[in-house]
Amino acid sequence: MAAAVSVEQILKSDPAYVPALMALAAIDEQKRNVGTATETYEKILGHYPDFSPAQKRLAILYASNPATARKRGCRHQGAPSIPR
């Protein structure tokens, strides 16, 4: 995949370049490498905790794969219950 090679080259020169990290995580999601994509989003959020695109993608991955969320120590699983 040509895009992956380009992204890897960019990250060699600047490992914290957020657009390339986001692209790398998206490529990993497409390849179904959920663990690697999760790690990349967490890396981004380690540097920029309020970066909402990474927050959103990571939340989607956690929601679609609860086992990954539990391994990462997420406390909230699923939607909150609504009182009647």
Image: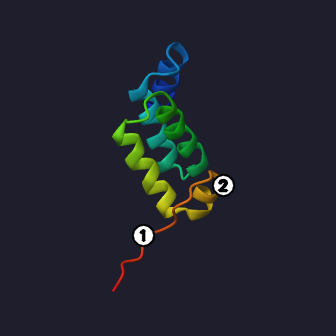
Seen in the picture, residue 18 relative to 31 is either above or below; the reply is above
- Nearest to N terminus: mark 2 or mark 1: 2
Label placed on residue 3: none
Q: Nearer the viewer, mark 2 or mark 1?
A: 1
Q: Position of residue 65 (x, y in %)?
A: 54, 62
Q: Residue at x 38, y 48 (%)?
A: 56
**Can residue 1 be seen in the rendering of this structure?**
no
Element type at marker 2? Answer: helix
- The amino acid at mark 1 is Ala
Q: Is residue 20 above or below residue 73?
A: above
Could you tell me the amino acid type at mark 2? Lys
Q: Residues within 10 Å of mark 2 (few under 14, many from 20)?
A: few
**In this picture, residue 55 sits left or right of residue 8:** left
Position of 56 with respect to 76 (left or right) is: left
> Residue 29: percent from the left, percent from the top?
49, 49
Q: Which residue is mark 2?
A: 71
Residue located 62% across and 53% down the image: 73
Identify the image quadrant of residue 18.
top left
**Looking at the rendering, in which quadrant would you find the C terminus?**
bottom left
In front: 61, or 79? 79
Residue at numbered disc 1 = 79
Residue 9 vs residue 48, the one in the foreground: 48
**Nearer-the-camera pick, 53 or 25:** 53
For label 1, the SS is: loop
Question: Farthest residue toward the bottom?
Answer: 84
